Image (tube, helix red, strand yellow):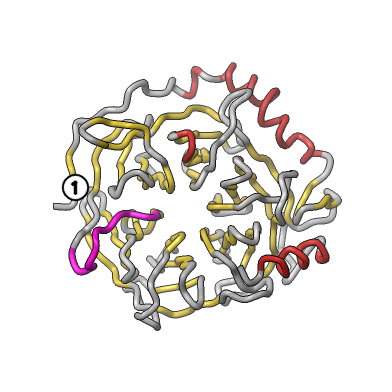
Amino acid sequence: MNVRRTSGRLPGPPPPPDTMNNFSRTLQSHHCARALAIATAAVFALGGPVRAQDPAIDLDHGCIGWEPGSQFAHPQGIFFDTVRGECYVADTGNHQVVVCDENGIPRYRFTHYVPANGAMVPGEPKCIAVDQEGTIYLVDDASEDLAVLDPTGRLIETIVPPMDDCGMAESFEYVALGPDGVYASLSCPKRRVVVIGADLEISRVIQLAWKDPSERACITGIAIDSQGGIYVTDACASEMVQMYDANGGLFRAFGSHETGLENFSFASGIALAGDGNMWIVDTLRHVVSLFTPEGTRLATLGGKGLEPGAMQYPTSVATDGADRVFITERAGNRYQCFRVEGEVPGGELRNQDQLGMLLEEVGND
């Protein structure tokens, strides 16, 4: 039995978005605008200023909290809903999900609760996906199960991970939308991904055929293409970016634990752009890089810092399927959105000296 039916309900649904216009206007003028207003005058990338008319990638907007004086706390997940033009932030340390409009203005939020000792207690939201109907699929660090929520954050059902053929208790780790359902990676060291159908039942368990079965899996991110191809980041593997077909057959991998911009120290998130390129997070190097499907690096964003365009331990990445990429920072306690303007020159890099020193410093971490 894969679905746990529950009567648990979350207290206090958020006010409808259309009642929050005054709140949003206040927030726009006093909070998120304070955080990233300078983006209209100068763009920061790789830890330093870039002329606004020059770069192929510009800082578009960002957000640091849900109301004046508030602050995200170690956010771990982000998802952009292309149907409704909304950005969902898994605000882990504040036990909540914050929903922003496409310009980074928070619209509403809800606390996520998990069962503990017979009660429902605030959880630690980690990874999130939203389907076309607005149903929310949420992985929480404080629960092994996958929560299915309605658009207001009320619990609909709880999906239990399979416990067979792993040799250990499993939990859901990361979740993404696919052409035939919701895909979720499991904590099993054998690299397993499940597909959840419209009936909220597990329809398939896919064994990813990694070339070295002796390597323990540490999947840290998942993305699915339009054909059901599975893309994962695996921080423990000898090659940390792995691409599998819909049946779990490996067809490409790249990115070793070495120095160099094409490699990684801790690959920890992946998202597909509309053109087939992919964004990869490297938490320890404080960068997010754009790669072709063949593994050629096109651009790199970040560099350790708190100024706009720099990053402090990025954790997750999402795209709008077109020209924007959204990045959360666990230590920066914010998300930033960058816009790709036209074709990205191959290998383009800004502040080469600064980033070079950074990578030399962390390359063997």
What residue appears at the point 61 percent right and 52 percent down from the top-left corner? 313
Outermost residue toward the left?
Answer: 1
What residue appears at the point 58 percent right and 58 percent down from the top-left corner? 283
Quadrant in the rendering for residue 217 = bottom left
Residue topped by disc 1: 3
115, 244: nearer the viewer: 115
Residue 246 on image: x %, y % = 35, 70
Residue 62 on image: x %, y % = 65, 39
Question: Looking at the magenta stretch, what is its main secondary structure?
Answer: loop
What residue appears at the point 79 percent right and 56 percent down from the top-left corner? 55
Question: Which residues are drawn in magenta?
Answer: 164-174
Q: How many residues crowd around disc 1 within 10 Å: few (fewer than 14), some, or many (20 or more)?
A: some
Q: State the SS at label 1.
A: strand
Residue 19 position (above or below residue 31): above
Q: Quadrant of the C terminus?
A: bottom right
Q: Is residue 165 magenta?
A: yes
User: Would residue 361 be found to the left or right of residue 167 on screen?
Assistant: right
